Image (cartoon, rainbow, N blue to C red):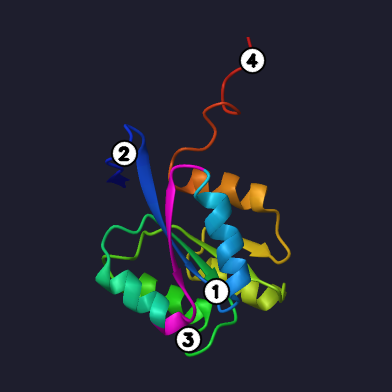
Amino acid sequence: MVPDSSSSEPTYHVLVADDEPHIGRIIKMKLEQGPFRVTLAYDGREALDVLRRDSGIDLVLLDLMMPHLSGLDVLAAMKADERLHDLPSIILTAAGQEQQHHRALELGASEFLTKPFSPKKLYARAAELVGIGGEESGAEAP
């Protein structure tokens, strides 16, 4: 978590890796409505470069099918890297194939969402994974 100098609220840095620029822009716009700062990558190799270069990433969103390295390839590399091993990740895919879903979960993905996904649901899950979700919804009823 990196503090944002413009407010007292913390800002969480999210890496979004998707080879479809419009998907990345939609996710960026939605997340940046809250306490998130988004970096976009357009293929798996670029995503891995960002992860290895920037130690301040709090959450990773990976498209399953990308050029150079797939989302699963990036996830496997993350899990093999001691520094990135525990980083929460959400896999996004248009191909909701059960085998890929199981493989993503085996590699430690925190969530697996099939496109088209609800930006509101994605935001809620991202917030939960960085530890800011559930304050209102988690309150006990009187």
Mark drawn on residue 6: 2
The image quadrant of residue 18 is bottom right
Is there any visible trace of residue 83 in the rendered image? yes
How far apart, in angstroms, are the residues tagged by discs 3 and 1?
A: 11 Å
Give the quarter of the figure containing the C terminus.
Answer: top right
Amino acid under disc 1: Asp
Specify start and end residues of the magenta stretch as a single range.
34-45
Q: Earlier in the sequence, mark 1 or mark 2?
A: 2
Q: Which residue is mark 4?
A: 141
Determine whether label 1 and label 2 are within 8 Å by CB: no
Q: Position of residue 129 (x, y in %)?
A: 48, 48
Q: Which residue position holds label 1? A: 18
Residue visible at 57% across and 26% down in the picture: 136
Q: Which labelled disc corresponds to residue 69? A: 3
First in residue order: circle 4 vs circle 3: 3
The image shows residue 9, relative to residue 65, as above or below, that is: above
Which amino acid type is marked by label 3? Leu
Q: Secondary structure at mark 3?
A: loop
Query: Per the image, is 44 magenta?
Result: yes
